[in-house]
């Protein structure tokens, strides 16, 4: 079994979303604390961590207490991200697309003076590759049909899910559904933290069935 990744002082990007392994994330960067971070990550290929906010906003808000800014809090389990597309259309603005890697657990966190969070993290085991069982293939087929319809309507370049597609893999299908569905933040985070990709897909299938999206 491969040794799990350990990183020290990994820069973090707290967001009002949950990033799943294998996913794609588009960001508009304009805060000073993130402009430097994303610029360095783009040049070096180094990853940063995406974690889901539980308190505070994505953009820092001044507040007349403490260090002058509103408190920020976030979950302990996040996902590595790497910049794969980059543009800077004007000074002080970056447009990037990031690809998600593996999950990690925060073991120590620290907010630097200019507001950037860094953390020591321990990598979590990657999702096992598991074929979609026959009784859940309707969930995979429904995802494939949805992406085909979105591609016809908006064009492949605008799809929220980017290739390579893996419609025969439990984790990939479950993760893409979790990104597309309007799920409560706590449920979205809880599904991402599950270690069993088949269980994650089964829970997604139950949700789709209850809402008439796919009859499993």
Image (tube, helix red, strand yellow):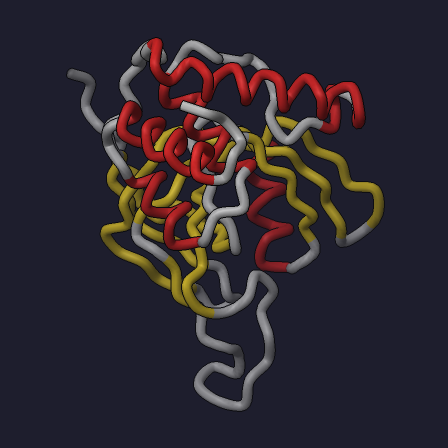
Up-down relation of residue 85 to residue 192 (above or below): above
Q: Is residue 39 visible?
A: yes
Up-down relation of residue 120 to residue 83 (above or below): below
Residue 155 in the image: state x and y as whole percent.
79, 22
Q: Total number of numbered labels? A: 0
The furthest residue to the right:
90
Q: Is residue 126 visible?
A: no
Residue 198 in the image: state x and y as whole percent.
28, 23
- Which residue lies at the image location 52% right of the left edge and 32% below the top edge? 82
Quarter placement of the C terminus: top left
- Which residue lies at the image location 76% right of the left edge and 54% below the top edge? 92
- Which residue lies at the image location 39% right of the left edge and 45% below the top edge? 10
Q: State the residue in front, 158 or 42.
A: 158
Up-down relation of residue 114 to residue 98 (above or below): below
Determine which quarter of the picture holds residue 112: bottom left
Quarter placement of the N terminus: top left
Residue 41 in the image: state x and y as whole percent.
55, 37
Residue 173 located left or right of residue 165: left
Q: State the residue in front, 19 or 138.
A: 138
The furthest residue to the bottom:
64
- Which residue lies at the image location 35% right of the left edge and 27% below the top edge? 201
């Amino acid at each position: 079994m491969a040794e799990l990744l350990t990183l020290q002082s990994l820069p973090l990007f707290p967001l009002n979303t949950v990033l799943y392994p294998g996913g794609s994330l588009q960001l508009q960067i304009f805060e000073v604390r993130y402009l430097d971070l994303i610029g360095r990550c783009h040049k070096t290929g180094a990853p940063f961590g995406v974690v889901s906010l539980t308190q505070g906003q994505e953009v820092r808000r001044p507040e007349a207490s403490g260090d002058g800014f509103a408190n920020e809090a976030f979950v302990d389990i996040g996902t590595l991200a790497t910049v794969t597309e980059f543009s800077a259309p004007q000074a002080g603005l970056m447009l990037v697309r990031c690809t998600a890697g593996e999950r990690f657990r925060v073991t120590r966190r620290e907010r630097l003076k200019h507001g950037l969070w860094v953390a020591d993290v321990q990598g979590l085991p990657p999702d096992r590759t598991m074929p979609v069982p026959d009784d859940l293939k309707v969930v995979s087929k429904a995802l494939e049909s949805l992406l085909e319809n979105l591609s016809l309507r908006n064009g492949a370049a605008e799809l929220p899910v980017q290739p390579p597609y893996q419609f025969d893999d439990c984790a990939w299908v479950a993760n893409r559904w979790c990104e597309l569905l309007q799920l409560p933040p706590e449920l979205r985070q809880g599904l991402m933290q599950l270690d069993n990709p088949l269980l994650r897909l089964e829970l997604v299938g139950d949700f789709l069935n209850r809402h008439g999206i796919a009859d499993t």
